[in-house]
Every structure is written in structure tokens, then in C-alpha cells.
Amino acid sequence: MDISPKCFQNWLLVSSQNIVGSNSHSMFITIVKSLFPIKHKTPDPARRSLVSKKYALLFALFLLAPAGSLFAQQVNLQEILQEGTENYPFLKSKQAEIRGAESRVKSVKTDYLPTLVVQDQYTFSTNNSVAGSFWGNEGSVISPSGGIRPDNIYTGTFGSFTSALVDWRVFNFGKVKANVNTAKAELTRSQADFENELFQHQIRIVDAYLVLLINQKLVEAQQQNLERASIFKRVTDAAVGSGMRPGVDSSLASAEYAKAKLLVLESQRSTKAQALRLAELTGQLRDSIQVDTMQFYSQLPVGTASTDSFLKNPALRFSQTQIDASYARSAAVRKSYLPSISIIGSGWARGSGVSNKDDSFHTGFSSGVGYQVYNYLFGVSTRWNLTNILRVRNDYKTEQFQVERFKELYQTQKLQLDRQSREADMQFQLSMEQARLTPVQLNAAQRAFNQAQARYQSGLTDLFTLAQSVNALNRAEVDKFVTNGNVWRALLMQAAAAGDLSIFLNQVAK
């Protein structure tokens, strides 16, 4: 079945709406119409072959459109924030730190439970001993118990030993509780650290979004300036070629065109670099990202000034939790030298190839496996390492210095946030005044440009004067985008100082 160019064109135009954004869709329509102009004539064989090649070219373009930077799908601020908070690796590391602190709390709480140790052993050994005491050397010496006789017997026999020991430190004078409180304080510190890092990361994402949006607007402004420079160059070249203008005008027009092209390239470079920075903050690098303008260039925000709003900042709360955790550690260290009172209990059974009746030897394995004696033990034990107080005293002083250190860091953070809050209020007020003045500047520059263009076309002024008006217009267009974006960035500074991102997001949602 033969498909007419018009049918194929309409199909592509309708399909393109499902894969590209509004701006890219307009560009896609232009490409389609340029490749398939609708003419009501019967094509000859050569034209039919050319149309077939256009079909193949456009079909390939249609397939590659979703992956191309030309048709990059626009994303809004809420989507970027959600992606960044869910995928950024450093935030995931903070979450893993929280889970580790939670496990630490559970681990320390097990110190409340009694210790139960069971063991069973089978041995092959000699049985020679003498009366007397020996030093256990922290358990590294083998028990020398055995038969006491005038001659050593080096024939080995089998033996067995089974025991169960219970040690329950029922009174520890608050040592376990202090360790649990330390673990809980570390958990609170980890949670505050994550909340602060999450907030700061969201601030960085929003700021990168605004900067990228400003850069995208600057690209548009420089492209408009390049179009003006291109038109002037063509008109001037034609006028110089006809002898109506001096040759220097052509050189000046070429210089202005090259300058405009350089400005476009520079704005594109900045935009691509900022897009990579924003993509990095989302946790997934992409070669191109197109952000939605939303309401950032249709309205100006309303500032919110509060003197003590920075006191609720997550960074300040994190500094406070560091102080609390250091206090908890110092309390645990101070109590670590106290004694412990334990209820102990034990039961054991012993078997040996040496008979406990007549001291006779039996070398068979079964003779040593069977138990010959059984014992049990119950009691109360007190342990106190008195010399440990010297080490604990120095460790306690160390933690006290850490407390002092974190207090000073808290005051430093508080001072910085106070300065940031005052600076944000000042920046917002000045940015708002600038944003109100830029439309006046732009209107004046537009009128000056129209007048200079009319005078140049009438031969009443030179191209240099017209070029100055073009530069003034370009500057006014750039200032409009920059000052408007700076107002929103100043509002973001207020939200960052107050520690409340909703101050910014609530005005974006309006």
C-alpha cells in the first residue's frame, strides 16, 4: 500500500506529541514540514526515490528522538527532589549508619542478660601431679590436677569434662544503663546527621535547579541575540554589496555576529556543566536534562523574615546531638570503674580413664567417656578492679574536653546561621528591588534598539551605534533572567537559614 507524504507527515506529527516536550515538539514539526512539503503534484521517479530516502531518515529520527538531547523530557522541581533524595549514594550511607546505630542499641541491651557458657570436651592425657598452688595466668595454663604418686606414669588415658556456667551481674551500679544511654545518644546523633544532610542536599538540588534554569534562559537570550546579529549581518552585507554602505560596516557586522556566536557557545557550555551538576545530585548522571520553568518566571515570591528562625535549623540540632552524645560517653566512662555484683552458678561432670576408687589405669576410650563425679556451685561474686580508676580518670577528662569542643562547634554553627539568616533577608530585599527595575531597563533598551534600527535603516546613524543598542538590549534581557532567578535563590537562602524548605516550596506550589 502506498503511503502519501501528507499521511506519513500527519502520523509522525501526532506520534511526536507522545515522546517529546512542547518546545521540542514545535521543532519536530518544523523538521517534518521541511522534509515533507505538501504539494499536489505527481512525483517523478527521481522525486519518489528522494521521498523514500526522506522516509528512512525521518523514521530513524523518530526512533532516536526519545534518547536524543534535542527531545529531552522536561522534569519539574518535585521530581528532581524525589529522585535526588531516594537515589543519592551519600544519603544511603547515612541511612546505613542509622541502621548500624539501631543494631548497636540492641547489642548493648543484651548486657542486662546473664552469661551462660556451656562446654564439653574429650581429652587424651597423662595423669601425674603434685600438691601445691599455681597461678592461672589469665587462663592460659592447663590444669595440673591428677594422681599424686611417687612415680610418673606416662601412659595416656582418655577423659571427658562437661560444664555449664551462669554469671548474672545483677548489680552493676548503672554501668550497663550508661552504655545503653550512650548507644541511644549515638543513634539520635546519626538520625540528626541524616536529617541535616538530607536538608542540605535538598537545598543544593533546588539551588542547582534554579541555576540551571537561569542558564537555560540565558541560552535563549543569547540565541535571540545571535538571530538579530545574523539578520544585521545579512542586511549589512547586502547593503555593502550594493554600495549603499561602506565596507567597514560589513566587518563590524561580522565581528558582532562572531561575538554573539561566542556568547551562545559560552551559555551552552555553562548550561551543560550545570546540568551535569544537577544530574550528579540526583544520583544518576545524564548527558542532558531539561528543567521545567514552572512559576519561576511568571511571578515573584514573598519573603519571610524571622529573627530566631535559624534556631530550628537541622545543622544546629545535629550540633546539639553531638554534645549530648559526648555527655553520654563521659558518663559511661565515669561509671566503668565501679564494681559488679554477680550471682553465679555452675554444674559440671568429669570422666577419666583413671579410676577414682583404686587409681587404676584404663586406656580404652569408653572408660574415659563415662562420668565418675558430678558437682554444682552457687554463690555471689564481687569484682572490682581498683587500679582501673587511674585509666578511667584520664579517659573521663578526654571526654570532657570533647564536650567542650562540641559546645564551641555549636556556638560556631549558631553564629554562622545567624549571619546567614541576616544575609538572606538582605539579599532578598535587594534582589526584589533589582527584579522590579529590570523590566524598566528592558523596555528602555527595546525602545532604544527600535529607534537605532530605524535610524540606521534611514541612514541617519552608523552601525556602531546600532551595535551598542543591540548590546544594551542583550544585557537587559540577560539581567531580567538573572535578577528574577536571584530573587528565588534569595528566598532559598532564607529557607536554608531557617531550616525549613517548605518556606520555598509552598510558594512554588501556589
Image (tube, rainbow, N blue to C red):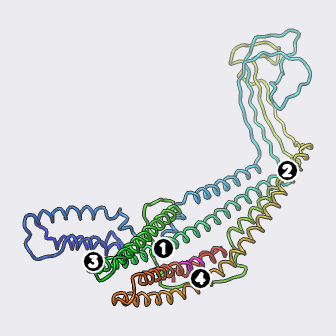
Q: What residue is drawn where x is 75% and y is 61%?
A: 322
Crowding at dot 4, Cα within 10 Å, few <14 / some 14-19 / many 20+, comes out as: many
Picture quadrant where residue 382 is located: top right
Check contact, mark 4 vs mark 3: CB within 8 A: no
Q: Secondary structure at mark 3?
A: helix
Of pointers 2 and 4, the one earlier in the residue sequence: 2
Picture quadrant where residue 419 is located: bottom right
Residue at the spot of label 3: 241
Nearer to the camera, 320 or 294: 294
Q: Which residues are magenta?
A: 485-490
Q: Position of residue 192 (x, y in %)?
A: 68, 64
Residue at the spot of label 4: 431
Amino acid type at mark 2: Asp
Label ID, residue 213: 1
State the separation of the CA atoms marked 4 and 1.
17 Å
Picture quadrant where residue 223 is located: bottom left
Going by the image, does 210 lie left or right of 462? right
Amino acid type at mark 3: Gly
Of pointers 2 and 1, the one earlier in the residue sequence: 1
Q: Nearer the viewer, mark 4 or mark 3?
A: 3
Crowding at dot 3, Cα within 10 Å, few <14 / some 14-19 / many 20+, comes out as: few
Amino acid type at mark 1: Leu
Q: Secondary structure at mark 1?
A: helix
State the separation of the CA atoms marked 2 and 3.
90 Å
Check contact, mark 4 vs mark 1: CB within 8 A: no
Identify the image quadrant of the N terminus.
bottom left
Crowding at dot 1, Cα within 10 Å, few <14 / some 14-19 / many 20+, comes out as: many
Going by the image, does 92 lie left or right of 313? left
Q: What residue is drawn where x is 59% and y is 70%?
A: 203
Q: From the viewer's perspective, is residue 13 above or below residue 341?
A: below
Residue at the spot of label 2: 395
Of pointers 2 and 3, the one earlier in the residue sequence: 3
